[in-house]
Amino acid sequence: MLALALVGIGALLFAGSAGASRREVRAYSTTLSSGEEARETGEGDAGGFVTITLDPRRRQIRYQITVSGIGPGAEAHIHEAPSGQDGPAIIGLKLLPDGSTSGCVRATRSLIYKISRNPSDYYVHIHDREHPHGALRGQI
């Protein structure tokens, strides 16, 4: 009987800790490079770095992006796809003309949880007019 009670308490503690982790703020950083592009090779001398912070309680995705060597008309997005594959854009990120920016976008908790569970299935994608299919990419 005592063994069953201990198993039950252990299960409750595990379930409670799993629920708490879903509410945690999580940050991910990655390098952006042209070699990560799935469809075309981006700008060879371009590069960058991005930090993504997922905050399910506030329903926010915060980001800091620094890039160099990209052309005019650059845009940034978070896409859903594993490494080596293209996927749909799911979140738009603002990118300043000089390539450095930080910001915050609203997102549903379910999307934030989905990204948190498998961050490597998502990537940050930078494209410009010369490279409409991608200048830089970094898997989260």
Image: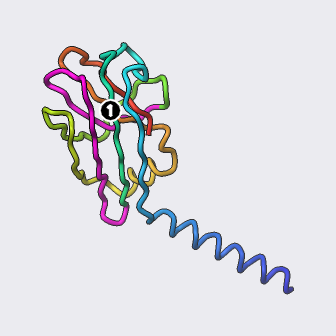
Residue 63: within the magenta?
Answer: yes
Q: Over which residues does the magenta segment extend?
A: 56-81
Q: Residue at x 49, y 28 (%)?
A: 83
Hey, which quadrant is residue 137 in on the image?
A: top left
Image quadrant holding the N terminus, namely: bottom right
Residue closest to the eye, 73 or 12: 73
Q: Position of residue 124 (x, y in %)?
A: 35, 35
Q: Position of residue 107 (x, y in %)?
A: 30, 53
Q: Residue at x 40, y 54 (%)?
A: 110
Hey, which quadrant is residue 17 in on the image?
A: bottom right
Residue closest to the eye, 49 or 9: 49
Q: Is residue 121 left or right of residue 111?
A: right
Q: Position of residue 60 (x, y in %)?
A: 29, 57
Dot 1: few (<14), some (14–19), or many (≥20) neighbours within 10 Å?
A: many
Is residue 36 depicted above or below 120 in this figure?
Answer: above
Residue closest to the eye, 123 or 89: 123
Q: Residue at x 38, y 26 (%)?
A: 33
